[in-house]
Image (cartoon, coloured by chain):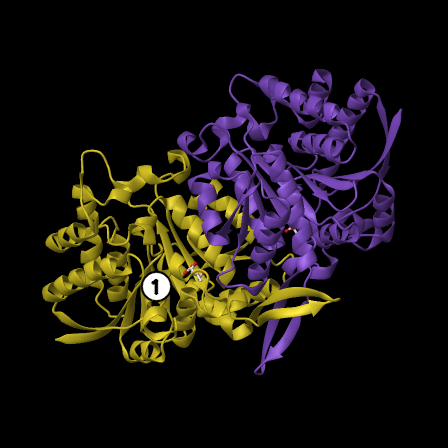
Chain colours: A purple, B yellow
């Protein structure tokens, strides 16, 4: 029997409660599909600051590096918001992405049929379906460039550097083209090439990789401001979007909100090996932590993505997706409550998915 | 009688036809409210590249500096898209903003009552009304920072620098606080302070200006990724938004698309003096240039904004707004065509607004 080593980074706020549900579901899937999982917990974010004085202890990096994959809840909260920039929970998140070399962030924005009405967009804009995959570069650009304070003409200033090397662009382009090839064969690369030099290098490099290695995938380019509009005007035009770290941060959040299913969306961060880091796209929601109101489905689906992308268990992954769909027809957590369906808490939703698996 | 000197930068694509309509309306307003306008044309963008070999001739800068204000159509088009970055039409636009010191870009996203149904958002999300003012910093940040190519560990790379000085942030903050004071007294400053050093300086500086000079305005902060979501989820929560050049580019386009009235939206770019540059937020639409399909209303409303903000003619400005509203009840250009209303071309719409003035 296959045994996988998974690190759990439960994190802050609702993190622990939602990860606990995903673990239950993973265990049930293991029983059914014949694999076992060994879990190890490690600290990240605010809870790591409280316990170890740093948002990313070296021990966490070591454990994640030794594991087959990592499942993350969420980090951050008002408690740590006043700490200086390099001691904040977010720094742990950026740090673990960097330390594990997770340069590709896959953020699907899909509408769950059961939740069609939750989209803020009109039905005719959403159309038949919405299924956009945003591939965000995750370990480069202005997130990791040189930054600091300085004096300019005698006045104080602060700066950050957006920088991309050709190999950084090539590897994320390949991830996106591969993804497009498996889906609708349409890739839209988003940049601001009419202003930024890094965008011009980005555009040229993506075009070259496409022409040389992916002639079967249709490549288009779009400016980031236009993309922010088009996601609202006609999201159906998109299949896979590939873009830089900062643009991907903004556009993937916009896309997920358009789906109306933000409590349901999972994400995967991948590097050059098989291991990845999986997490819901929503945050740590400190205001509802411990109340039972948290929706564990995005984390459960993140565990499903992990089975598919990192652990070669596509059938178990599909079974989890199906169980989630089935659960949505029977009960809802408060964030997606619907008339005629019973409202359940976080644990009950986890149990329901297990029972439907 | 007051006589104003206005430079017309008709630009490319539909630029000339829409500016011509705005000129007719300005002249009519002058007759009615007792002022005269002397126009001077100058070249910008693609047409300047064709005629003078540069997107921003020195003569254009000189004329604009000597004028009471500038009215711009739109620049750019596929014809010039393959030129190198520093010779493109957009470079003319960035250049004129910089040369005239127009550091504050006001981009209202409003829904015209007559066009409520055009919003891609559901009626219950739009609610009673939508009236968001995005104040975008326009002559700093990554648009104007150092950029270039270099080698990093033996591989080619490209970089751009996001930089803000304290005085740059202070002056845009004051414009935004002043604007909020005249409106709903709520200002939301948008940044990525959990990652960027320039955002941390931005946040601290805006907070200080607020506390010292605008205690009557309620200031909040929001991360840019969250703002991209909130604009879709609940745009009514915003009154005035202030943000950096690049974030303002993205968010103002998103906000205007949400309004569904993008062919109707005007913008103003202001510096420390009274003179400004006024333009529609939409682009040069080369595909419909010369066909008569262009909607001149955003440019007409831009001329109205000019009368209000730069020429001290608030009554004439209001009269133009009212005439536009009245025109919308009678006829439409093809982009906003509506059943039961006759469809008119660009010139006919200009004439209609004049006749209703
Ligand atoms: C918390 C923050 C640093 C992070 C990011 O911007 O990458 C988050 O917004 C995300 O998108 O995962
Ligand atoms: C054309 C482009 C350089 C410009 C910008 O990004 O400023 C445009 O998008 C705008 O917003 O006015």
The local crowd at label 1, few if under 14, some if 14 to 19, many if 20 or more residues have their Cα within 10 Å, is many
* SS category of the residue bearing label 1: strand
Quadrant of the image containing the N terminus of chain A = top right
Q: Quadrant of residue A2?
A: top right
Q: Position of residue B192 (x, y in %)?
A: 59, 57
Q: Position of residue A162 (x, y in %)?
A: 62, 63
Horizontally, is B104 left or right of A87 in the view?
left
Task: Determine the chain carrying the residue at label 1.
Answer: B
Q: Residue furthest bottom?
A: A154
Q: Residue at x 34, y 69 (%)?
A: B50
Whether residue B72 is visible here, answered yes or no, is: yes
Horizontally, is A16 left or right of B335 in the view?
right
Q: Position of residue B183 (x, y in %)?
A: 36, 56
- The count of marks equals 1
Whether residue B234 is visible here, answered yes or no, is: no
Q: Residue at x 66, y 70 (%)?
A: B150
Q: Residue at x 63, y 34 (%)?
A: A182
Horizontally, is A167 left or right of B98 in the view?
right
Does A106 sit above or below residue A202?
Answer: above
The residue lying toward the viewer, choosing from A46 and A305, is: A305
Q: Quadrant of residue A300?
A: top right
Q: Residue at x 70, y 57 (%)?
A: A167
Q: Is mark 1 within 8 Å of ligand 2?
A: no
Q: Position of residue A81 (x, y in %)?
A: 67, 54
The residue carrying mark 1 is: B268
The residue lying toward the viewer, choosing from A47 and B259, is: B259
Quadrant of the image containing the C terminus of chain A = top right
Horizontally, is B243 left or right of B290 in the view?
right
């Amino acid at each position: 029997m296959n045994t996988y080593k998974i690190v759990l980074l439960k994190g802050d706020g609702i993190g622990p409660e939602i990860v606990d549900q995903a673990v239950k579901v993973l265990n049930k899937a293991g029983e059914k599909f014949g694999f076992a999982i060994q879990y190890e917990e490690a600290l990240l974010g605010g809870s790591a600051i409280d316990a170890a004085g740093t948002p990313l202890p070296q021990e966490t990096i070591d454990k994640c590096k030794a594991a087959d994959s990592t499942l993350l809840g969420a980090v951050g909260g008002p408690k740590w918001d006043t700490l200086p920039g390099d001691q904040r929970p977010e720094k742990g998140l950026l740090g673990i992405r960097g330390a594990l070399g997770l340069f590709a962030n896959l953020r699907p924005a899909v509408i769950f049929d059961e939740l069609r009405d939750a989209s803020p967009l009109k039905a005719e804009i959403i159309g038949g379906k919405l299924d956009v995959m945003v591939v965000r570069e995750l370990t480069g650009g202005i997130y990791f460039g040189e930054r600091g304070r300085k004096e300019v003409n005698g006045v104080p200033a602060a700066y950050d550097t957006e920088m991309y090397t050709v190999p950084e662009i090539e590897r994320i382009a390949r991830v996106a083209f591969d993804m497009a090839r498996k889906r609708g064969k349409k890739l839209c690369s988003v940049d601001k090439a009419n202003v930024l030099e890094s965008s011009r290098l980005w555009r040229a490099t993506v075009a070259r990789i496409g022409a040389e290695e992916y002639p079967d995938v249709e490549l288009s380019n779009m400016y980031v401001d236009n993309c922010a509009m088009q996601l609202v005007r006609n999201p159906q035009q998109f299949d896979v979007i590939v873009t830089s770290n900062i643009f991907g941060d903004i556009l993937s959040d916009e896309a997920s909100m358009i789906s109306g299913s933000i409590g349901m969306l999972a994400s995967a961060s991948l590097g050059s090996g098989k291991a990845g880091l999986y997490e819901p796209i929503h945050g740590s929601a400190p205001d509802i932590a411990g109340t039972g109101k948290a929706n564990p489905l995005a984390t459960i689906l993140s565990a499903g993505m992990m089975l598919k992308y990192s652990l070669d268990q596509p059938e178990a992954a599909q079974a989890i997706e199906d169980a989630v769909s089935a659960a949505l027809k029977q009960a809802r957590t408060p964030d997606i409550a619907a008339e005629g369906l019973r409202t359940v808490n976080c644990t009950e939703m986890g149990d329901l998915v297990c029972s439907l698996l």
